Image (tube, rainbow, N blue to C red):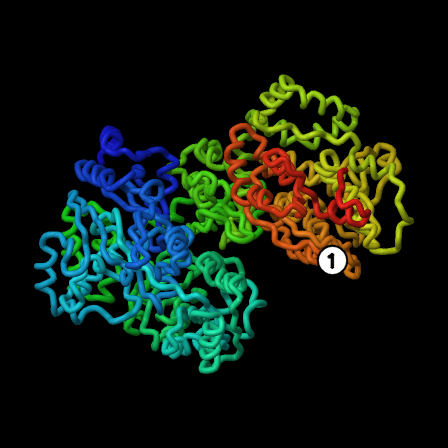
Amino acid sequence: MTGRTDLRELRAGLAAAVRGEVDFGTTARALTTMDASNYRRVPLGVVSPRDADDVAAALSVCRTHGVPVVARGGGTSIAGQATGTGVVLDFTRHMNRLLSLDPEARTAVVQPGLVLDRLQEAAAPYGLRFGPDPSTHSRCTLGGMIGNNSCGSHSVAWGTTADNVRELSVLTPRGERLRPGPGWAGAPAGLRELVDGELARLRTGFPELPRRISGYAVDALLPERGADVARSFCGSEGTLGVLTEAVVDLVRAPRARALAVLAYADESGAAEAAAGLLEHRPLTVEGMAADLVPSAADLPRGGAWLFVETGGETEAEARARAEAVVRTADVLDALVVTDPARQRALWRIREDASGTATRMPDGTEAWPGWEDCAVPPARLGAYLRDFRRLLADHGLRGTPYGHFGDGCIHVRIDFDLLTGPGVARFRRFSEDLADLVVAHGGSLSGEHGDGQARAELLPRMYGAGTVALFARVKGVWDPDDLLNPGVLVRPAPLDANLRFSALPRGPVDVAFGYPADGGDFSAAVRRCVGVAKCRTASASGPAVMCPSFRATGEEEHSTRGRARLLHEMLAGELVTDGWRSTEVRDALDLCLSCKGCRSDCPVGVDMATYKAEFLHHHYAGRRRPAAHYAMGWLPVWLAWVARTGSAALVNAGASVGPLARAAKRLGGIAPEREIPRVAGETFTRWWRGRRPAAPPGDGPLVVLWPDTFTEHLSPSVGRAAVRVLEAAGLRVALPPTLRMRGRPVGDGRSRSAARLLTARRSRVCCGLTYLSTGQLDRARAVLRRTLDLMEPVLAADAPVVVLEPSCAAALRTDAPELLHDDPRAARLAARVLTFAEALERHAPDWTPPSLDRPVVGQTHCHQHAVLGSAADRRLRAAAGLTGELSGGCCGLAGNFGFERGHHEVSTACAEEHLLPSVREAPEDAVVLADGFSCRTQLEQLAGVRGRHLAEVLAAALDGTGTEDG
C-alpha cells in the first residue's frame, strides 16, 4: 500500500467483493492490534467473512493489492501470530458454527470461528468431547487451535489438536480450494516432490517429543507416518493457507472423574515425579508452585503440586485410580476430590494461571515470550533447575507452571520491556534460554506456537538447513508471501513491534490513585494481557464478567476490547484525540460498571474505575449527557424532595404519562423505564421519630449507613436492618449529621465556639452516583465532606454497616483510591461491613429465625466482585434459606439501565440468569435482592418484588412472613 488512494481502493474492492462486514474504522483496527502476546501491529482493516466464498474473495482482493492477510479467532495467541499490518480476517462473527456432529463416527464438522466450549457442550450429551482443552477453552476457537496446534491439560491422554484432526478445508492465497488429509490428500502442487527430496532430513532432524510445536510439522508427511497433509498443516500459524472448515475427531469422555492433588516440597520435586505417573494412564499431570497460588488454603501442605486427574465408569472406579496414584507417588501430602464443584474450584486455580502469572507476588509486571518451552518429561526436573539458574543469572524472576506430564512449562517473566536496556536483556535471555532448551533436547514451543516470539531462534533448534526447508514449504503453499508474513518464515526480530513501545513514558495525569499499579494509569491499562476471559459466552457459577459482551457479542464491549482502546488512546497512533476520543467513549458506554472484571479477570482489570477516569477527562469543561445530571446528582434531587416534602407530588407527576415522558426525555432516561417512587418518609426521619421496642442493650455499637437508596427509595430496608441488628443485641446509631464550617483549629480536631455556631447539618454519602458517571471532582468533594462528618466515628471503634452493596463497594475501594491523599478514606474503608458481616463478627452467638424456604435471586455484582458473599451464604444457611443465588449482573446497574439507549442491553443481561431463575423458582421461594437496582429490575421486568436479606429476617422476627415497608 502506498497511500490514501490505494487504501480507499482496497476498502472499496473488499466491500464490493465480500458479503460480510468490511471495517476500516479506528475501533475495528484498534481492537485487533494485539493478541495475548507482547507484540502490537496495526492492521489496515478487518473483514468478517460469512463463508468460504467471502474468504476467497477477500484473498483475491488483497493479493491484487499486495496486502498481507492474517486469520484471527479468539485473539488469545501468546506469540504474536494473530496480529498483522494488512487485513485481519475475523472468523468469530459469522463462521462460528458447528456444522454437524456424528456420535457414531465420533466426528464433528466445525467452522474456524467456533469456540471450543460450544463444541464440548454439543458433544457432551453423547458422552463425547474434543480431547485438547487449553485453559482458554471458553473463548479460544477451533481455527486458532488448529493454527497453533493447541494442547491443553488432557494432552497426556488425548494428544494435541493435530492428533485429533481428520480432514481440513483450506483456501490457498491464490484461491485454490484444498481438502488436506492423510495419504497426500489436499497437498498443493510441488509439496510431495519437495518432501521426497528431503526424506533423510525429515527422519533425523525433528526431536521426538509429545509437545514439539515449533516450526512446520513437515515430518508428518513422511510415508511411514501416512503422509498426512492435514496433520502437517496444524501448527502452521496461518502462514500456509486459510482454514474454512475442519473435520475433527471426538473422544469418549469418562463418566466419572477424580482429582488427586499431590503436594511436593518444590517444583523440581513435582517435575521429577511427573514422568513416573504416566504409567497410570492419567488424564492430566499438571504442575504449579506456591508462588503462583494466591492462597494455598484449599490445597494439601506443600510448596508445589501436581493435579492428576483419573477417569472411570463410576465415581468409585475413578477414585480408586486416583488413590492408586497417591499410593505410588512419593508426596508430602495429598488430596483426592470427586465432588465436581470442588474439582472445578481447584481447576480454576490452574486455569487462571495464565493471567495471575502476569503479576509477581510483589506486584511487578511479568510477561510472556517464553511461555511454553517443552523438554522430554524425564528431563523436566533438571531443566527447571537450570531454568531457575538462568533466570537468576539474568536478574529475572518467573513462576513456572504447566503440563508437567508432557514436559511443557508455561512461565511469565518480569522482563523490563519499557526501556532499551531492559529490551536488550530480554533478547540476551531469549537467546540463552533457546540454547538451554535445545541442550535438554526440547522444543522452543510446546503449545502456543513460535509466532514472533521464538521464530527468529528456530535455527538454534533445527539448524539452518531445516529452517531453509520451512521457507521452501512456505513457498509451495504461499508463493506470494501473502499470509502472516514475518511469522515462522523470515520472521521479524523477537524484540521488534513490542506493544509497550507506543505507550507514554511519563506519568499520565489521573484522578484515581491506582495503588496496585504504582499510581501509573498506563500500567493499569497494561494489566490486560489479552487472555480474554471476559469473552466467555456464559457466566458460569457466581461469575459476573463481562455482561455487556455476552449481551452484544461484540469485542468492543468486552473488558479486553475496552482495554485495547484505552491502550491505543494512550499510544496516540490510531486513537489520536486522547481523552476526547469518541471511539473509547462509545466502547465504554455499554460498560455497566459492574466491577465483575475486578474479581473475575485473572489480572484484576478494573474497567469500572477506568471508565470513571475516562468520563472525568472526556467531559472536563464540557456539557455532559443529561443522564449524568439527572442520575449522577440523584442524592441532591432526592434530598431536595425530602426537604420540601414533595414526594407525593413527584410520584403523582411520574404516574402521569405526558409528564413522565417529558421528564424522561429531559433527563436522558430510557422511555421504556418507569421512574421509581420516592418514599413519603425517609429512613432518617423514621429513625428520629421511632420508639424502640425495647431499651437499647449493652451490645457492641454499630453505625448504620443511610445510603441514598435506603434513605429515599427503600426505607423499609433500613427499618428492617435496625430491627434485626437490635434483635441480635447490637446498639445501632446513624452517622453524625453536624459538619463544622470553616477551617479546623490547631491539630484539626479541636473546634472553636464560633465554628460550633456556624455548623450546619449534612448527610454522609459514598459518592457512588458521581463516581459511576465520572464526575470525580464532585465525588471527591462529597467524600471529603463525608469524612469530615465521620471523624467522630473514625475516632471510635464502631464498624460501619452499609446495606446497599454498591455503596459498600464504593466506600471500601473507590473512596480510598480516589482520595489516595487522605488517610481517613482508608480508615473508613477498613470499617465498612455488609449486613451479614456485621452480624457474623459482632453478634456471633445470635441465632436468626428459621424460615426453611428456598431462595432465588442474584448475588449483587459488587458484592461478588468487591465485598464477598461468604458471610451472606452462612447467614442464609443459619436461617434455613436453601439454595444458591445465580451469578451474572441484573443489568440495571445503577444509572446504566435507566439511561436512554441502554434498555435492550439491560434487559438482555437480566434475561441471562436473574429473570429465568425467578420464573423457574418454586412458589414458596424467597426472592432475594440486596441491591436497589436488582429489586427495581425485578419489579419492572418481571413484576416480582425482591427483598433485602434484612427484610426477610425482620419479617420472620415479627412473624409476618413478609415486610411490605
Identify which residue, 239 or 791, lies in the foreground.
239
Q: Quadrant of the N terminus?
A: top left
Question: In the figure, 283 relative to 241: above or below?
Answer: below
- Image quadrant where residue 630 sits: top right
Identify which residue, 113 or 305, lies in the foreground.
113
Instruction: Tally the numbered discs.
Output: 1
Q: Quadrant of the C terminus?
A: top right
Q: In the displayed orientation, state which residue is furthest to the right.
A: 695
Q: Is residue 370 visible?
A: no
**Image location (x, y in percent) of residue 620:** 55, 30
Question: In the figure, 749 relative to 151: above or below?
Answer: above
Looking at the image, which residue is at 47% across and 77% down?
A: 320
For mark 1, give the secondary structure: helix
The amino acid marked with disc number 1 is Glu
Q: Is residue 537 visible?
A: yes
Q: Residues within 10 Å of mark 1 (few under 14, many from 20)?
A: some
- Image quadrant where residue 282 sits: bottom left
Q: Is residue 566 left or right of residue 68?
A: right
Q: Is residue 40 left or right of residue 906?
A: left
Q: Which residue is mark 1?
A: 840
**Image location (x, y in percent) of residue 636:** 70, 30
Looking at the image, which residue is at 35% across and 66% down?
A: 155
**Image location (x, y in percent) of residue 386:** 38, 74
Looking at the image, which residue is at 67% across and 30% down?
A: 676
**Image location (x, y in percent) of residue 109:** 29, 51
Q: Is residue 163 left or right of residue 316?
A: left
